[in-house]
Amino acid sequence: MGPIKGARGRSWRLWGRSWGLWGRALLLTSPIFAAKPTVGTGHFRRLLRFTAGFEDFARINAHHPRRILFPKLADNYLKHTCLYCFTKIDVLVEDTEWHSFFYCPCTARPRELFLQACPSFYSIFFPESPPPGMVVSMAKIFHEARFNRYLTNELARFVAGIHACRREVFTSLSKRGPLNPLRVALERVALPDQSD
Ligand SMILES: [Zn+2]
């Protein structure tokens, strides 16, 4: 007998909950980074937060921390966009960990330093053919770091650099005044009324 109406969704929710519990239980016995890093605690903590999706990316928080100063960021067209690319090169691209890791011009310097330290990943950052996906490519690098202290250290430095670059940008974009580049960019675009 097939599932009665509504049971299918409930069973998927239960399955999802079981999967989440299983995943958390697995993390208790199998650490993400098995090789103890030698970078500072702050850098490693930043790496863990980045890996867990706890950092300040619009993919996750939809710019809620900035909406008081810039209510227009609640618009569906902008609430997940990378503010650096929006204000500096007038491009709308989703603000994600993998965008900052592989492409965002804002994080070019820490990316360059990471590739100098780990040149074997150059082909992943600059592939000759279209990659399977940025998330998959990033997961491959993080998976390789599991038992590799050197790579864990370099990833921690890279992620700390990403955080520092973005914080600097967010600080400059949060300044009050009519010449604020984010305010100027927001006034430039005409958006349909789709706020939530
Ligand atoms: Zn960007």
Image (tube, grey):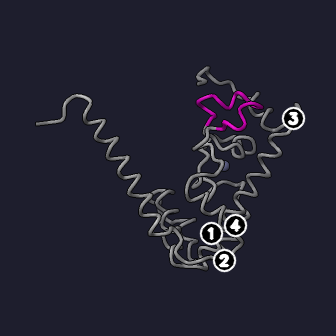
Q: Position of residue 84 (x, y in %)?
A: 72, 46
Residue pictured at 63% horizontal, 34% vertical? 78
Which residue matches tag 1?
155
Residue found 56% across the figure and 72% down from its top? 121
In the image, is residue 25 above or below residue 167? below
Q: In this figure, which residue is indicated by the disc labeled 2?
A: 117
Alpha carbons under labels 2 and 3: distance apart: 39 Å
* 3D distance between C-alphas at marks 4 and 1: 9 Å
**What residue is rendered at 52% in x and 67% in y?**
142
Residue 158 horizontal/vertical position (percent): 67, 66
Residue 80 colored magenta?
A: no
Left/right placement of residue 191 relative to residue 14 reads right
Which residue does the numbered mark 3 point to in the structure image?
176
Circle 2 residues within 10 Å: few <14, some 14–19, many ≥20: some
- Residue 13 lies, in percent from the top left, at 34, 41
* Secondary-structure class at tag 1: helix
Q: Which mark is nearer the camera, 4 or 1?
A: 4
Residue tagged 4: 43
| Magenta-colored span | 63-79
The stretch drawn in magenta includes residue 74: yes
Count neighbours of disc 4 (C-alpha within 10 A) and say few if under 14, some if 14 to 19, many if 20 or more. many
Taking 34 as reference, is 18 above or below it? Answer: above
Q: Secondary structure at mark 3?
A: loop
